[in-house]
Image (cartoon, rainbow, N blue to C red):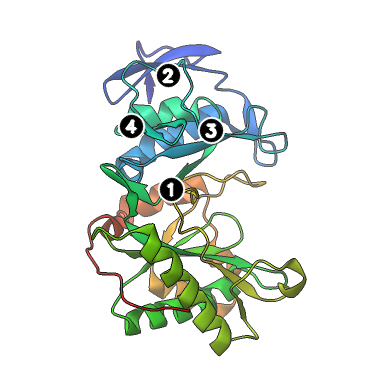
Amino acid sequence: MTSAGGRRLTKETVIEVGGRQLTVSNLDKVLWPATGTTKGEMLDYYARIAPVLVPHLAGRAVTLKRYPNGVDNAFFFEKNCPSYKPAWMETVKMGDVNYCLVSEPAAVVWMANLASIELHPTLAAKPDLGSPTAVVFDLDPGPPADVVTCAQVAFLVRDLLGQLGLDCWAKTSGNKGLQVYAPLNSGASYEGTTPFAKAVAQLLERRHSDLILSYQLRAARTGKVLIDWSQNVASKTTVSVYSLRARAEPTVSTPVAWDELDEARSSGDAGRLTFDWRQVLQRVEHRGDLMAEVLERKQDLPELRA
């Protein structure tokens, strides 16, 4: 991300991203006070991560989670793509909402310039927005359970899916938990994936009732991991892989290998599963996109009912 003429980035500056000219503003504004991380650093991250991020957003309706005054202040979700979007910015209609579509790096940086710290896409993509390309299991710990406890549950999810003939991949949420994705890319419907995900969660709850919950009940969540299967509906979105998170520090929803999860599980060290934006850029440089196969792997949804 550079200024169009190599100029110093001031309050309003024209930059070039992927051959597009973008006007960006307030690059010195601090969005993460605890670390002093600025809007300019956020835009730089999104510009540099775009080559691996864009394929995960392409064709999907994206909801923006905007923090105009930083992570310590009020936020709002924006579903309708703003009317002042660039002429080249694509959109897709779902119901009465005209969502932003991402097909190039400039689109990511343009959205980030709106202080859209977090990007939340649908599970389905064009041309069939009724066909989810994956089943997702959102693992959310209830204290004192933590991301290491989620790693234990992730392996239970992986083992059960493996018995059913499905391979799966994991990423950190960038917040407290993990998400496990089983790619489909085979024309599945939400009418199939929703009951399947629910059945997996309920079966694991029956087998490991001391560790797992399959339903939202705050009073029962202490020390357990909720397997949130309800993300598998057309109206829900899940934070994108490589999205920044609005936490005290600029953490990122990061793909992790199963051996990394095993190391965290064995050591009990939650820090092994927390990554900031600089670390993620280094990881991608050295390891590539650990979730790339989720975009391509074709798997049929097995039969499993609660």
Percent across and percent down for residue 37 are: 60, 35
Position of 138 relative to 129 (above/below):
below
Real-space CA distance between mark 2 and mark 3, rounded to the nearest whole angstrom:
14 Å
Contact between labelled residues 4 and 3, with CB atoms less than 8 Å apart: no
Judge by depth and name the residue closer to the eye, 29 or 146.
146
Judge by depth and name the residue closer to the eye, 136 or 33.
136
- Looking at numbered disc 3 in the image, what kind of residue is underneath it? Ser
To which quarter of the image does residue 271 belong? bottom right
| Residue occupied by mark 2 | 85
Near mark 4 (Cα within 10 A), the count class, few <14, some 14-19 or many ≥20, is many
Relative side of 50 to 144, left or right: left
- Looking at numbered disc 1 in the image, what kind of residue is underneath it? Tyr
Q: Nearer the viewer, mark 4 or mark 2?
A: 2
Real-space CA distance between mark 3 and mark 1, rounded to the nearest whole angstrom:
13 Å
Mark 3, secondary structure of its residue: strand
Real-space CA distance between mark 4 and mark 1, rounded to the nearest whole angstrom:
13 Å
Percent across and percent down for residue 286 are: 32, 55
Contact between labelled residues 2 and 1, with CB atoms less than 8 Å apart: no
Percent across and percent down for residue 79 are: 51, 34
State the mark number for residue 116.
3
Q: Residue at x 65, y 86 (%)?
A: 210
Mark 2, secondary structure of its residue: loop
| Residue occupied by mark 4 | 105
Whether residue 133 is visible here, answered yes or no, is yes
